[in-house]
Amino acid sequence: MESPLAAMLDPWLMRNETIDWASPRTRGLASIRDLRYVGPRPELHEATMIHWDPVMHVFRYNDNEMCPTVEEFQAYLQGFANSNVLAIPPIQENMSHLLRMKLNISEELAASIIHDGELDVPRLIELYGPNEILENHVEQTHLRFAFSICALAAYMLVPANGKVCPSIVRIASQMGVRKNIIPIVLAETLMGLDLFKSRESNVFSGSPRLLQVWLFDKVGLLEAPQANWDHFPRRMLKRSMLYPEQDMLGWYVILHDIQSNDYVWICPWLNMPEMAINSTGFERVLFASLASFTFYIPGRILRQLGITQGLQRAGIEDFQLPDFNSPTLRDYQRYWRNGVLEGPSPDFVDWLDSRYVAWLRVEIKARPGGYY
């Protein structure tokens, strides 16, 4: 199921005159706003979850593995800075104080928004929604910041347990100065997949609508775009679905039957010349979520990078996530600034040879809890 926060935000989004969308400061917000045009398909998400491997962080369709990358997620959101200066979550910071400073509100009012370790988005919408704004002439700076928090909670950093983390206030603040929030969004989405797979949550957390946009393109559920900008969420409505609406079982059958040459391994309309293959000092790409680290393994999804898929080197699975604290977050930022990037290979082929398929099947069956 989807979080109810998106429905709560709809009346605000429908009153476009309340925010100056033409301002350069709202480019990122406008991209988030456009996710409202992506009609959620929970049955498709349910079918997709069957193929998610929470240990290796890949979707596995038959012998094919794929995972959303930072560059792919970012390409769908027109207006976000392509920056290696990452937004990072706060460690032991007073979010109520930051909210007071950003919105110029009293301590009592801030306490009505952040309380009991939770940020009350409905309360924020009540205070800054379209009716209040038009009557009280709220400053654009304060309005934009309040909307940023609500939009992040509704579309990009959807909570798994229904409780919005107050750290979103700091993320909204960093987004306002053009720091890259996409790694945090992807981290929360991957962790949300893990939680939903284990049935620890019945809500698709992170950014389920952005994940759905990615899935439509990569698995080839939509017709190819006629122009490069047709991959943006709002323009996707113009592209026809190649399959009629299905229930969960119908989507499962479709996804299960798709073959390697049906996938769009490299979406040329995304225009991504390079992708990160190392951000940790190890052969992993590491991401900070709001409260912990997570990862994906480029060695398993090389075809998405335009590189012919080969066997991984021995020992690549020996990896332990770092502790989540200020020193490791500083190291994380440094690794991203100096991360290793890889461009497509001129001799790229998207098919798997028999050696790789044999290795993959043995590796999965040998892993504790493995499945195929």
Image: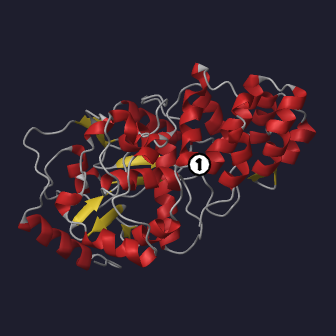
Answer left or right for 127 relative to 143: right
**Residue 65 position within the rendered picture, expressed as x and y whole percent measured from the top left:** 27, 61
| Residue 88 visible here | no
Q: Quadrant of the C terminus?
A: bottom left
| Count of numbered marks | 1
Q: Position of residue 321 (x, y in %)?
A: 43, 55
- Identify which residue, 246 or 158, lies in the foreground: 246
Front position in the image: 276 or 205: 205
Quadrant position of residue 2: bottom right
Q: Is residue 12 visible?
A: yes
Name the foreground residue: 272 vs 90: 272
When the figure is inspected, residue 41 is found, relative to residue 26, above or below; the finding is below
Quarter-of-image position of residue 294:
bottom left
- Residue 272 in which image quadrant: top left
- Is the residue 254 above or below the residue 123 in the image? below
Question: In the image, is 199 to the left or to the right of 128?
Answer: left
Which structural element holds mark 1?
A: helix
Residue at the spot 73% in from the left edge and 45% down from the top edge:
11
Give the residue displayed 57% in from the left and 20% down from the top.
Answer: 24
Question: Is residue 183 depicted above or below 51 in this figure?
Answer: above
Residue 12 screen position, x and y as percent: 73, 41
215 on left or right of 85: left
| Rendered location of residue 257, percent (x, y) | 25, 72
Say what amino acid the circle numbered 1 marks: Tyr
Query: Which residue sits at x=69%, y=40%?
Result: 14
The single residue placed furthest to the top in the displayed view is 23
Question: In this figure, which residue is indicated by the disc labeled 1?
Answer: 155
